[in-house]
């Protein structure tokens, strides 16, 4: 089997008076620093000698010496490898600290560590926590593959794969502008749009641009944990606003504004996360009026606008009167698959310019190929066609999941059928009756305690049906029944 890359070595800056000593020190340093990891295969003695311009016997002697010391292991008819059990692993913690030269990184918050572990232990088929993720099995992969091939060829031929605008390709920004104007009643220019890698990046950029010295961030008392983690990581104090059966409690928000300076209010008005309720028009207008009076930004996370199953959805905050302070954040990842990582921010041009400045520092720009592909599919009508198709599929799964919950649990649970989205918010308080549940079986349900720090026992769970077939929905609900009953 061919190796993906040939490992390169550099002896000029390595200590030692002889080639033997310099090579010995180089290999030892690379193993200690982690550049050569346990189990890595080293170049053959002939290949390494040719690369460094030294005698092959010198390489052989170094390999033998490092093997005697426990750093390397030779496998007959296979090659030389970095040992799985390095000499330093037998040292005490005190002696390990003496030989470590790396600086200690700042510790993450408990919330960030939890989110990171959930991300690390996910696999390619589905997330560890399925609280309303799309089904990647429904992706039109043949259409995507053909479009990617055509776009790659065209960009290559016209030498358009270099660095570009950190706000995103003009093609995709124009396509997003048309979508926001035609589908969401938003009047914005391409200068007011920035392409990002999903809504979470948009939220994080907003947390970087806003100023913590101007006030706190207000979030609904049950909220999206990664958003809260982003605000806290950038120095914001997060204040909780009450929720009721219609979403954000405007009266409670008024009392918060009377007591605290507020830099921004973060909301998910289309389908509140996690409770799925839709914020009614009167509350939307009241929120926007307060934003002008108290001069705070409104961060609107419109993460699943495409999936509304009843009547036409209420227009987003960014399309309504007095919306000058709204930062509208959306994602195309749920339309296709999270792995495509494409989202957008729509805000005033000054905010967009600041977002682009942050992008230059961390990412330089987005993925040109994927952005052109998405633009091509939007302009041809294929995205709209795909949305219509999968919306029907997700609506069918929602109705099936609701029927299964009623059949399995009867009146022991209650819920309001969500008008859209890919999850159902289930009231399980009758089943729990104050019991403390730390976890649930499977990965398709999350307890309400995940979304707040203030509950002593769970009262609801969020069941994600979007990524599941009907058979998988039934199996998951039966698993829940065993655990809760």
Image (tube, grey):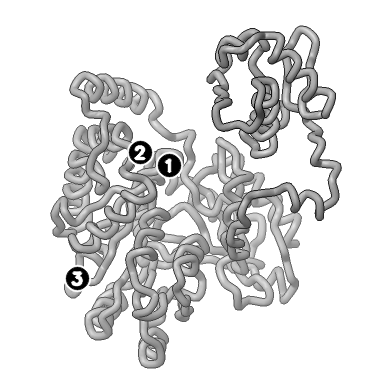
How packed mark 3 is, by other alpha carbons closer than 10 Å (few <14, some 14-19, many 20 or more), is some
SS category of the residue bearing label 1: helix
Depth check: give the residue in front, 35 or 399.
Answer: 35
Residue position for label 1: 393
Q: Is residue 138 visible?
A: yes
Query: Going 40% across and 53% down the picture, which residue do you hit?
Result: 201
SS category of the residue bearing label 3: loop
Judge from the rendering whether residue 436 lies leftward or rightward of residue 46; answer left or right.
right
Q: Are marks 1 and 2 in contact (CB under 8 Å)?
A: yes
Q: Position of residue 126 (x, y in %)?
A: 56, 41
Quarter of the image holding residue 90?
top right
Q: Which mark is residue 389?
A: 2
- Mark 2 and mark 3: span between their CA atoms? 34 Å
Depth check: give the residue in front, 271 or 411.
Answer: 271
Query: Going 56% across and 32% down the picture, which residue do you hit?
Result: 13
Q: Position of residue 398 (x, y in %)?
A: 48, 51
Figure check: 397 above or below 314: above
How packed mark 1 is, by other alpha carbons closer than 10 Å (few <14, some 14-19, many 20 or more), is some
Judge from the rendering whether residue 477 lies leftward or rightward of residue 424; answer left or right.
right
Q: Are marks 1 and 3 in contact (CB under 8 Å)?
A: no
Judge from the rendering whether residue 319 lies leftward or rightward of residue 398; answer left or right.
left
Q: Earlier in the sequence, mark 2 or mark 3?
A: 3
Q: Earlier in the sequence, mark 1 or mark 3?
A: 3
Depth check: give the residue in front, 152 or 145.
Answer: 152
Q: In the displayed image of the protein, which residue is found farthest to the front?
A: 17
Q: Nearer the viewer, mark 2 or mark 3?
A: 3
- Mark 1 and mark 3: span between their CA atoms? 36 Å
Residue position for label 3: 324
- Mark 1 and mark 2: span between their CA atoms? 7 Å
Figure check: 449 above or below 97: below
Q: Nearer the viewer, mark 1 or mark 3?
A: 3
């Amino acid at each position: 089997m061919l190796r993906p890359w040939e490992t390169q070595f550099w002896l000029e800056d390595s200590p030692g008076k002889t080639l033997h000593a310099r090579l010995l020190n180089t290999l030892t340093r690379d193993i200690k620093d982690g550049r050569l990891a346990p189990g890595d295969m080293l170049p053959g003695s002939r290949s390494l000698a040719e690369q460094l311009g030294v005698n092959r016997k010198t390489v052989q002697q170094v390999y033998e010496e490092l093997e005697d010391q426990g750093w390397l292991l030779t496998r007959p008819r296979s090659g030389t490898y970095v040992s799985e059990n390095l000499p330093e692993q037998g040292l005490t913690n005190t002696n390990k600290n003496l030989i470590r030269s790396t600086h200690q990184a700042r510790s993450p918050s408990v919330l960030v560590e939890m989110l990171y572990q959930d991300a690390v232990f996910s696999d390619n088929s589905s997330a560890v926590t399925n609280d309303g993720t799309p089904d990647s099995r429904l992706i039109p992969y043949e259409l995507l593959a053909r479009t990617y091939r055509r776009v790659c060829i065209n960009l290559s031929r016209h030498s358009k794969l270099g660095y570009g605008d950190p706000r995103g390709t003009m093609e995709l920004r124009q396509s997003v502008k048309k979508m926001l104007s035609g589908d969401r009643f938003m009047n914005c220019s391409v200068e007011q749009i920035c392409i990002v890698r999903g809504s979470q990046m948009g939220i994080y950029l907003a947390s970087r641009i806003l100023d913590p010295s101007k006030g706190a961030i207000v979030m609904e008392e049950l909220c999206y944990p990664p958003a809260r983690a982003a605000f806290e990581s950038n120095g914001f104090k997060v204040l909780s606003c009450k929720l009721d059966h219609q979403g954000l409690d405007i009266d409670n928000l008024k009392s918060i504004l009377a007591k605290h300076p507020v830099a921004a209010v973060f909301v998910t008005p289309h389908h509140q996360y996690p409770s799925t309720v839709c914020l009614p028009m009167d509350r939307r207008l009241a929120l926007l009026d307060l934003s002008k009076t108290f001069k705070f930004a409104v961060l609107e996370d419109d993460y699943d606008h495409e999936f509304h199953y009843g009547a036409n959805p209420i227009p987003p905050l960014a399309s309504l009167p007095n919306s000058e302070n709204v930062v509208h954040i959306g994602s195309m990842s749920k339309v296709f698959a999270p792995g495509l990582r494409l989202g957008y921010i729509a805000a005033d041009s000054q905010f967009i310019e600041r977002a682009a400045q942050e992008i230059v520092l961390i990412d330089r720009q987005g993925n040109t190929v994927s952005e052109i592909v998405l633009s091509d599919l939007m302009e041809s009508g294929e995205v709209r066609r795909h949305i219509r198709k999968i919306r029907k599929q997700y609506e069918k799964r929602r109705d099936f999941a609701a029927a299964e919950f009623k059949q399995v649990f009867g009146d022991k649970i209650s819920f309001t059928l969500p008008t859209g989205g890919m999850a159902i918010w289930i009231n399980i308080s009758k089943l729990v009756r104050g019991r403390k549940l730390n976890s649930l079986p499977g990965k398709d349900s999350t307890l309400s305690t995940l979304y707040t720090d203030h509950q002593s026992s769970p009262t609801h769970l969020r069941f994600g049906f979007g990524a599941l077939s009907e058979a998988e929905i039934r199996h998951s609900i039966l698993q829940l029944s065993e655990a809760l009953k």
